Image (cartoon, rainbow, N blue to C red):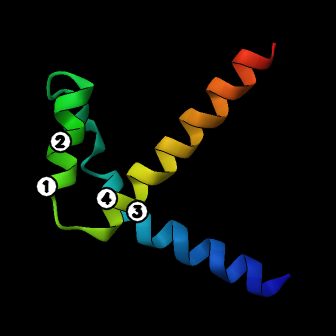
Amino acid sequence: MSLLLLLVRRMVAALAFPRVFLPFFTSLGLACSRRVLLNLVPSKRFHRIRDIVDAMDEACVRIYEDR
């Protein structure tokens, strides 16, 4: 159990820095243009956040369609 907790803490710490910039990106036009800009940023952390958001969106759509 402690290994899982350590992994979760590492992941949260790794994502803490990019979270500071998220409010800035939400005000940049359309979602498709933000995605293009995000794909141009050479940061694994930002790409990890993008992947997490994509997985959350996929899960939400699946839950909504099942109802």
Q: Which residue is mark 3?
A: 16
SS label for mark 3: helix
Q: Which residue is mark 1?
A: 40
- Quadrant in the picture for the N terminus: bottom right
Marks 2/1 in contact by CB < 8 Å: the verdict is yes
Instruction: Give the left or right position of residue 9, taking residue 35 as reference.
Output: right
SS label for mark 1: helix
Q: Which residue is mark 4?
A: 46
**Quarter of the figure with residue 4:** bottom right
Q: Residue at x 59, y 35 (%)?
A: 58
Give the CA distance from mark 1 to mark 4: 10 Å
Give the CA distance from mark 2 to mark 4: 12 Å
Question: Is the residue 34 above or below the residue 17 in the image?
Answer: above
Q: Earlier in the sequence, mark 1 or mark 3?
A: 3
Instruction: Categorize mark 3 by other alpha carbons within 10 Å: few (<14), some (14-19), many (20+).
Output: few
Q: Nearer the viewer, residue 41 or 5?
A: 41
**Residue 29 image point, x, y percent:** 15, 22
SS label for mark 2: helix
Give the CA distance from mark 2 to mark 1: 6 Å
* Residue 36 badge: 2
Q: Amino acid at mark 2?
A: Val
Q: Amino acid at mark 1?
A: Leu
- Nearest to viewer (mark 1 / mark 4): 1
Whether residue 17 is visible here, answered yes or no, is no
Q: Earlier in the sequence, mark 1 or mark 4?
A: 1
Instruction: Give the left or right position of residue 33, taking residue 21 as reference.
Output: left
